[in-house]
Image (tube, grey):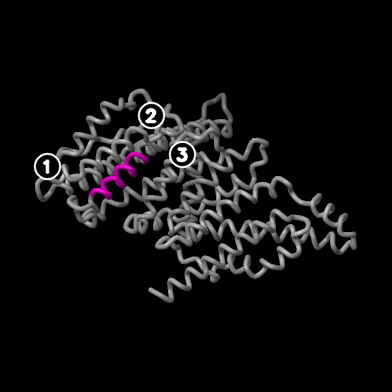
Amino acid sequence: MDDQASYLRTSKLALALAIIHSKPADKSGREHAEHLARVVSGQESKWRLKVEALEAEVLQLRQKLLLSKIHSGLFDSGDPSTQLQAQEPRCSENTLSLLEDSGCGLSNEQRTEPSEMSQHFGESCTPTPFPPLPIVKRHGATPENPLSSHMQFLQHLLELKNLTESGSLKTDLSLFENDYSAVSDSVFQLLDGLIAFYRKPKFPFSSFWTEAVDTLARLISDCNLSIRILKKCSKKLEEFEKTLLQIILRNNHINRFQVQHCVSQCLVTLGSCSLLRKSIISLLLSEVNIFADDLGTINQVSTNKGLCHTVLVGNVQASYDVTRYENIFSLFWVLEQLLQKETEKGNTSSIGHDDQEIKKFLQKHDETIFQLSDAFPLFTFYLWRLGILLNSVERETVETNSFP
């Protein structure tokens, strides 16, 4: 450590001497040093952009390589024409419609007419190389364009997985395990773009963003892909969930309710994946518990003042954040949707009373309703509904564990 510190001091001294000796006569040493710093900083920015562009191109080449390997694996054995004939309805109806309406905004150079897309798809359903994914340039691109190639790759991958898991087109995807890092890297990039957009959402939303969330949920619902995705992207997923939550809670615009509904629907779509539902329910219940505690505190302060009932209710209602109160009902709607999904057979995420937020909610459930029912009847009504749903989920879980 001493040698390193000595070397660092010597290097700094040598650099300072070099700057002083090389400075022009009409500039001071400080001005010359600041000029050199600006030059170096500008060069770093240029190189950083070049590195990002190259990394994006490498990732897209890895995407094409993985799709090509899976596509080739579909036709390694058997008669391809017979296999394709058996799968023709699925190809023509599902994948082609997906390609024609992906919601991706492409530049003029990348835009493809539906007839050309049909032709490309027809070629992809024969034992020929997989149609190339577009290389999207970052410079001069719209916000959606950098993500469109990731979206197309992930959607192609899901469609190919559907084919490999169907009757006559089976292949072992574990053969391509070493190439699956391209999937998690693509999901990471997609999440980055989604977080950036939803931090400052613009209404009306393009279908691209809702389709991206749906694709994300489908990927994580896949038992094989989810392991790799969650290993790399769990923190980023958590950040995305919190971003959606804050957009709902902090929005105070007069016409915010359409935006809130779209964002709430995104949370429901993510929660349709059983692996994500538990964390989303816990996150939303945490906010409900905090808000209920805040209302309880306001109610207690007013009660201690010894006000009559009518004045007490009016005083409590005048002391809370109206915007926050209105926004909390969007969370109630999302929670009800997710808890109803939880009661569906074969779609449970194993949530239970062991979760801290659920435990806290149910422990204080009756007391909170009793304290706040006069001042906030609608709020306590939704608390009561949530309590019923949570207890119903608990019963379903117990019955499922009792009768495997």
Q: Nearer the viewer, residue 39 or 130?
A: 130
Vertical relation: 24 (above or below) 173: above
Q: Which mark is residue 81?
A: 1
Looking at the image, is mark 1 or mark 3 nearer the viewer?
1
- Going by the numbered disc 2, the residue's amino acid type is Leu
Name the residue carrying label 3. Answer: 209
Question: Which structural element holds mark 2?
Answer: loop
Name the residue carrying label 2. Answer: 106
Graded by Cα atoms within 10 Å as few (under 14), some (14 to 19) or many (20 or more), the crowding at tag 2 reads some
Q: Is 366 displayed left or right of 199 in the figure?
A: right
- Percent position of residue 40, x then y: 47, 35
Mark 1 vs 3, N-terminal side: 1
- Percent position of residue 335, x then y: 56, 55
Mark 2 vs 1, N-terminal side: 1
Q: Which mark is residue 316?
A: none
Range of residues picked out in magenta = 151-163
